[in-house]
Image (tube, coloured by chain):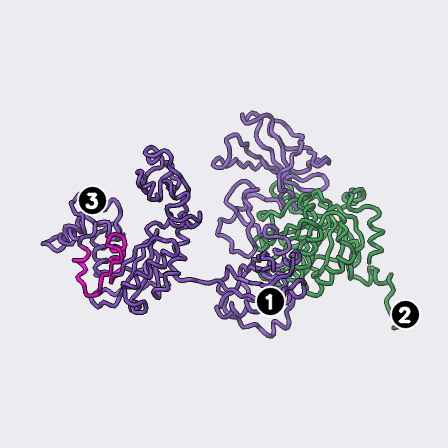
Chain colours: A green, B purple
Amino acid sequence: MDLATLPKAAELASVARNPRWRPAAGLALHSEIFAPGNGASGAGAAVALALDGLSTCKPETLEERSVLWVQDARSRKLTGRPYRAGLPETLRHRLIHVCADTPEDALFALEEGMRCRDLAFVIGEIAGNPRALDFTASRRLSLAAEKHGVPLYLVRLDATPDLSSARMRWRMRGAPSAPPRWNIGAPGKPAWSAELFRARGYAPGEWTLREDGHVLAAEPPLPASRSVSEPAPASAGGGEGQATASM
Amino acid sequence: MPILHQPVDPASGRRRIMAIWCAQLALDRWRHAEGCAPGEGVDAAPLVLVTETAHGPRIDAANPPARAVGGAPGMMLADARTLYPKLEVRPSDQAGDLAFLERFAVWTQRWGPWSALDAPDGVLVDVSAVAHLFGGERRLLADVHDRCAARGLAVRAAIAPTAGAAWALAHYGPPGAVLAAGEDMRACLSDLPMAALRLDTHVLLVLKRLGLKRLGDIADVEEGRAGRDAIQRRFRNRRSPAANPLIRLDQIMGRVPEPLLPVVAIAAPLVQRRLLEPIRHRPLLDKVVEDLAADMVRELEARGEGARRLQLGMWRVDGEVVLRELELAVATRDGAHVCRLFADRLDDIDAGFGIEMLRLRASWSEPLSLAQSDLEAAAEEHGTSLAACIDRLTVRLGREAVQRPVLKASHIPERAQGWQPPLEPERATQEVLAFHARPLKLLDRPERISVLYASPDGYPRRFSWRGDTHDVARVEGPERIAPEWWREKGSTRLRDYYRIEDGEGRRYWIYRAGLAGDGRGGMPDWFMQGLCA
């Protein structure tokens, strides 16, 4: 093979070649979402992204398939379990929750879930950087997702972005919500400040994602949130360098 | 199960029913469990079996020495102790007696094609046209007596054209009574006491007060002028035969049918392999389990069933039995799936000197009809079905780990959600009214936080949780949830829930437990319970 005909790495990563991500852009099979462990922003963003991805699929895949939600013990302790009354209405009756004790068990459950043709998508929550979740494990997850077409949204709580073969890697934090119409003082629809820092097929970028009714809306990042994002523990300085090496 | 009706006309003489009455069932079973012969060992002293009732222990059965000193079934233990203070007491086992009676009813099918339970201590067997196999009805009864005596059961048996007559003769007639087909039933039964009609005690009391003591008395009244009307006016309950002597009398005479519910033995599907050479290695074991699963699949297919629970027993050379149980999310007949699930369970088996027999038993199976597999779809689709996925997760992580959230009827947020196995149908409940927003996630246990707020019940301004301080930017509330007084103590405090968003866009659900000065404690505490998306 003539190496000269292959595209250069710089070209692959350039904005001109890769389109920018936007909501309803399509289904990403293996996403990682790095989120702080002191809130449910990561889980909320995972659910929102999953529903956004599903909305682009054919209607027959949207039918009543179950959803698997896997948590390891530490992530349960940090952010609790899913609460049925607070879930989006389309998910309430079809959620199956798996309490794994160790990250190894959680990875096993994630892989089994992705092999199941009757699941709409799989959400995982794993806290920290356990040894079990190394590059080999994430590669297994990617292959399983690609082979069977079941998307995985893996929420990494309080984790530094290490080596991973995830197709899309997000950094999510809660963002101030838009004030509701009738009570300006109340919290509104969820919003996240999202940073897509590594993706195959998309250029990296930053947005403020808002849940707008049933669809996800992306806005340019808030100027204020930029300054806040720097000292946040999830986006530690070393993380970016490692992530660059991973892809 | 089909309900068999006896022929209404007994004169045809074809139907013959044998009643077997285990007169001392509870005691016989207790003696068998103790391993002592009647009248020996512990049984030599006065002994009673008792059940706990609301008014104290009551005697269920008394052995002959106990009856000699005044103990009788139905008596309170305290009364019997007054008569004889050194009375031995053992608990009785009524559920065990009933279970034994079911097995006994199946065993009695050796004398007839079907049998029915006559709780609490009898069995009815249909012996129509089978007596000649045992050399006549007298010899049949002798055979029943001998075989039951060999099992340690004291029984009385009788044969008659109707179930009622057989029951009456077995309980109150002479031993080994046979009411032949052509005989005059009324004449034979007229000397039996009124209790032979299988009536409730209060009905018997009324009959006794009327002066009707024998079966012949009531039959005479019935035959007299306007006699039947007189009894019918007195006993108006037509629903329960046990409350109406006329219905019972007609049943005994065979004038009205008496449906009986036959006992049918259902054997759990079971396959086993005896091995020529004991096996000690895992690959061989896997092979044998595979063969057993294939056998089991055939067995289940023949019955049109699928297994829900499977038990694998491994008999070792030294006599130990290793059991492994498996529960499946839906009924299945997939041998490969079963093998795969068992493979996870066989890792920790100590084969010792070798395993010489394996037995696979489906202790719980459900109907599963044959399904045509869709050839085209099967070629396209890959991966596992949802049930297989749940099975695999359950086998590795445990039943409690794989669950589905369901609604429960409660106002308290943590009680409003319950968990159940994922593939079970959900119970119909009222949907939650969407007046209030609920958080996406709920902490397993609310965590205490310290909050700066305008006393006594103002909005929270700032709080610290897990060592971080959060400034409250937006707040909605309070949503007051009162304690459920029908479940909780009176000192439980109400909760005021606030949905808040802090300056960095994190959204939480916190509550204040109680009000200042509500008389249920000091200053109210604040708790973090939910995390919003």
User: Which residue does the image show at 50% across and 64% down from the upper left?
Assistant: B269
Between the residue at mark 3 and the residue at mark 2, the CA separation in whole angstroms equals 111 Å
- Quick one: A133 or A183, which is closer to the camera? A133
Q: Chain of mark 1?
A: B
Instruction: Please tell me whether residue B188 belongs to the stretch shown in magenta.
Output: yes
The span shown in magenta is B160-189
Q: How many marks?
A: 3
Q: Chain of mark 2?
A: A
User: Which residue does the image show at 60% across and 26% down from the upper left?
Assistant: B523
Between marks 1 and 2 in the image, the one whose residue lies nearer the viewer: 1
Q: Amino acid at mark 1?
A: Leu
| Label annotation for residue B206 | 3
Given the current orientation, which residue lies at the most extreme bottom position? B375
- The reply to whether residue A220 is visible in this rendering is no
Q: Secondary structure at mark 1?
A: strand
Q: Amino acid at mark 3?
A: Val
Looking at the rendered structure, whether the residues under marks 1 and 2 are on a common chain is answered as no
- Res A180 quadrant in image: top right
Looking at the rendered structure, whether the residues under marks 3 and 1 are on a common chain is answered as yes
Q: Which residue is mark 1?
A: B275
Instruction: Please tell me whether residue A18 belongs to the stretch shown in magenta.
Output: no
Q: Secondary structure at mark 2?
A: helix
Q: Amino acid at mark 2?
A: Ala
Between the residue at mark 1 and the residue at mark 2, the CA separation in whole angstroms equals 66 Å
Q: Which residue is mark 2?
A: A4
Please state if A121 lies on the left or on the right of B307 as rendered: right
Q: Position of residue A1 (x, y in %)?
A: 87, 73
Between marks 3 and 1 in the image, the one whose residue lies nearer the viewer: 1
Q: Position of residue A225 (x, y in %)?
A: 76, 44
For marks 3 and 1, the one nearer the N-term is 3
